[in-house]
Amino acid sequence: MATEWKGKSKGTLLGYKLYIFFLKTFGIGTAYFILRFIVLYYFLFSFDSSKAIYYYFKKRLKYSTTKSILCIYKNYYALGKVLTDRFAISTVFKDKFSYTHDGIEHIDHLLKQNKGGILISGHIGNFEVSHYFLESRYSISKIHMVTTHAERENIKEYMESQVSESSMEFIVVKDDMSHIFEIHAALDKGGLVVFTGDRYLPGTKTLKQEFLGAEAEFPMGPYVLASRLKVPVLFVYVMKGPEREYHLYARKAVAKARDPQALLKEYTLSMEWILKKYPLQWFNYFDFWKDSLKK
């Protein structure tokens, strides 16, 4: 079983093209229906990711064996719907979705200061659709997402050709640390810089923190950088509701400056809180706690 995240998602270019064809031609409902069969394949044959997510339900959430197995399928289906929605909202289907918020006043206050701000999210829910809704509420020049994501180039190029233009830009973490200058430049312009705080690539520095009852490792970079920069820090999640709706949650970090461990602890507590509301929307399919092989 993979014990670390490898930086790439599954799927082939042909598979993406076929699925998007059905979505654009027949609509979201048909796409969701087809998705059930795609999910069944992953449920039956993706042993490594299924073992990882089973551990999350069984050992961390303390579900029964039967419920944990059923939740593997439900989790895959939730992920598939989130990925479908990410494309749908970025095209002609945006008006098919509704959007609510809890804590939006923290973003209001942050933007009124015009000093920039850091948002820390995670691989739960569907944060990447947030900018399509935030743009209609605010006048934001750019939203910058810091990422180590290394999707296959042919898939990336195809997806970019299919979606509408948005204010989301990506700052890719580089070995020469030049991304630090890009982050400072974005903040100096009053922009929002987004980190995902729950994944790291092999060889990068980490911090350890208890999460859902067991110790886990988190990337050190976002917490060190966010704790040192003199800008507000928010924990922000965008979670899918039962129908075609999304809910944004924003909470203000209160950890003292230059204390990345305290900031990480706040982050894990906020993640635990949101996962109690949306347990099926945890989308990390590797040995997150480094002990699922032993349990």
Image (tube, grey):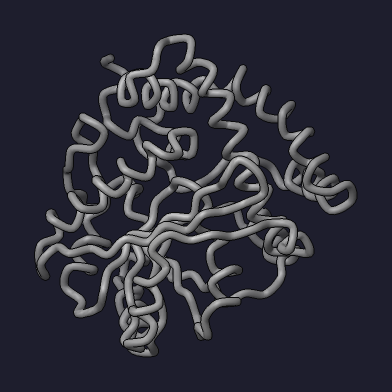
Question: Which residue is more in the foreground, 216 or 48?
Answer: 216
Q: Quadrant of residue 155?
A: bottom right
Compared with 22, 49 (above or below) is above
**Res 150 visible:** no
91 shown above or below 117: above
Q: 269 or 55, which is in the foreground? A: 269
**Residue at coordinates 60% horizontally, 40% vertically from top-left?**
242
Quadrant in the picture for the C terminus? top left
- Residue sitting at x 34%, y 82%: 116
- Give the answer, above or below, for where 123 lies relative to 66: below
Q: Position of residue 187 (x, y in %)?
A: 34, 83
Furthest residue in direction right, as rendered? 25
Q: Could you tell me if residue 147 is visible in this image?
A: yes
Quadrant in the picture for residue 290: top left
The x and y percentages for residue 257 are 11, 70
Q: Residue at x 26, y 74 (%)?
A: 232
Q: Is residue 269 left or right of residue 77?
A: left
Q: Residue 166's spot in the image, x, y percent?
A: 62, 74
Q: Residue at x 67, y 49 (%)?
A: 244
Tell me if 247 is positioned left or right of 54 in this view. right
Q: Quadrant of the N terminus?
A: top left
* Side (left or right) of 98 relative to 192: right
Is 57 situated above or below 275? Answer: above
**Numbered circles on residues, count:** 0
